Image (cartoon, helix red, strand yellow):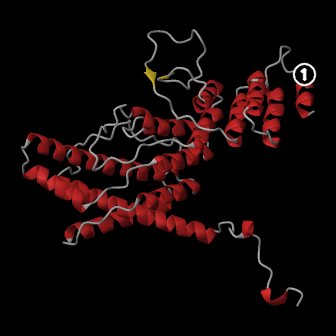
């Protein structure tokens, strides 16, 4: 009665999101399997309409091949889903029903997140490869149509390709959210090199911000071109976490310099191997554009940089990152000091296994 007419006490806003249960995970996987089936059906129908069947080779989109997750295996549920999809394909191909449409890019991103959270990274990469394949076919069909219109030599094949592209609308081309989702799941499963290969793919996309020409012209037709891929702070944190997992403090520091504007020149193609000065022989690799535009690092960014120094067993670099963090106006938290104290224990001492714990107590104070 003391609560008045308000009835039961309401939960605070931060309790409104309940944790996911087994039923929720099963529903996410069911939706992911549905997206996989629709994606495969639409892709096969698009190949058939464009005249690029399985016997005709087709060039992949620029940026290399899809990375494989070493040690991953397709689960039994994935095999069952593939079998049901094949039977559905044979049924649709024998009927005269209209061609299936592609799922939206938001549905594909949700399916990638569900598959990655379940630990089936290989299955997520296969769906990602089909997204890239569909976008490549649409871009090739639009490029042929634009070239024919410019030459004035349009024939039946180009007309059919244009009609097929209009029939299937626009396939779900991978976006920055797509790459960030896959990279974060790869890091969660302990595969930082797969995450770096995914970042190499997004960097080679013509829509990446550092690949756009300065005059503002697009390298692909406007009908299939998406908005410029402009990395944000979240994507930069995921990329820095990949460098930190490998103990590559030099690449993590270079990424931080790009964000803060302290980097004066372009990077080198092939950076990230952690090679010291004088180790590389032969001509220097070509200068490439930046990975990220100027951004404002947050607490997660600085803690990831300190963690990179921790994994590299470089206490001086970690202390320098702490000083730069304070100078930037970001207040360190418990995770920052925990990484620094752990670096004291991991650094190589001059007397073998005996290490001086005095810096750890100084950091504690």
In this picture, residue 22 sits left or right of residue 1: left
**What residue sits 48% from the left and 50% below the top?**
178
Q: What is the x, y in percent for residue 319?
A: 78, 26
Residue at which label 1 appears:
356
**What residue sits 23% from the left and 56% below the top?**
165
| Mark 1 Cα-neighbour bin, 10 Å: few <14, some 14–19, many ≥20 | few
Q: What is the x, y in percent for residue 349?
A: 83, 18
The answer to whether any part of residue 7 appears in the image is: no
Quarter of the picture containing the N terminus is bottom right
In this picture, residue 94 sits left or right of residue 102: left
Quarter of the picture containing the C terminus is top right
In this picture, residue 295 sits left or right of residue 269: right
Q: Is residue 338 above or below residue 168?
A: above
Q: What is the x, y in percent for residue 148?
A: 12, 44
The answer to whether any part of residue 237 appears in the image is: yes
Choose between 4 and 136: the one closer to the eye: 4
Choose between 265 and 271: the one closer to the eye: 265
Q: What is the x, y in percent for residue 41?
A: 31, 62
Quadrant of res 219: top left
- Callout 1: helix, strand or loop? loop
In this picture, residue 20 sits left or right of residue 11: left
Quadrant of res 339: top right
As drawn, the residue found furthest toward the front would be: 215
């Amino acid at each position: 009665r003391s609560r008045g007419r308000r009835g039961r006490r309401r939960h605070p806003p931060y309790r409104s999101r309940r944790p996911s249960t087994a039923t929720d995970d099963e529903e996410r996987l069911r939706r992911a399997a549905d997206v996989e089936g629709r994606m495969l059906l639409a892709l096969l129908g698009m190949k058939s309409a464009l005249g690029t069947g399985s016997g005709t080779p087709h060039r992949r989109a620029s940026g290399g091949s899809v990375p494989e997750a070493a040690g991953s295996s397709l689960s039994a549920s994935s095999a069952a889903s593939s079998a049901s999809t094949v039977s559905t394909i044979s049924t649709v191909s024998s009927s005269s029903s209209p061609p299936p449409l592609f799922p939206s890019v938001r549905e594909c991103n949700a399916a990638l997140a569900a598959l990655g959270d379940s630990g089936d990274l290989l299955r997520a990469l296969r769906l990602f490869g089909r997204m890239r394949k569909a976008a490549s076919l649409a871009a090739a069909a639009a490029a042929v149509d634009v070239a024919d219109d410019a030459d004035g030599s349009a024939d039946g094949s180009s007309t059919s390709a244009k009609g097929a592209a209009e029939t299937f609308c626009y396939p779900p081309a991978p976006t920055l959210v797509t790459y960030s989702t896959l990279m974060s799941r790869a890091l969660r499963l302990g595969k930082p090199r797969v995450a770096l290969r995914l970042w190499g793919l997004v960097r080679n996309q013509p829509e990446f911000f550092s690949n756009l020409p300065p005059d503002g012209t697009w390298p692909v037709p406007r009908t299939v071109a998406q908005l410029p891929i402009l990395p944000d702070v979240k994507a930069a944190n995921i990329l820095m976490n990949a460098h930190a997992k490998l103990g590559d403090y030099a690449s993590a520091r270079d990424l931080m310099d790009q964000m803060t504007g302290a980097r004066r020149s372009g990077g080198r193609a092939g950076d990230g191997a952690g090679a010291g000065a004088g180790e590389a022989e032969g001509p220097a690799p070509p200068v490439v554009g930046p990975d990220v535009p100027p951004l404002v690092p947050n607490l997660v960014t600085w803690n990831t940089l300190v963690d990179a120094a921790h994994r590299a067993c470089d206490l001086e670099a970690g202390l320098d990152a702490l000083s730069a963090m304070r100078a930037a106006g970001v207040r360190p938290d418990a995770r920052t000091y925990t990484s620094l104290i752990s670096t004291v224990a991991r650094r190589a001492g001059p007397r073998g296994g005996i290490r001086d714990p005095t810096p750890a107590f100084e950091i504690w104070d």
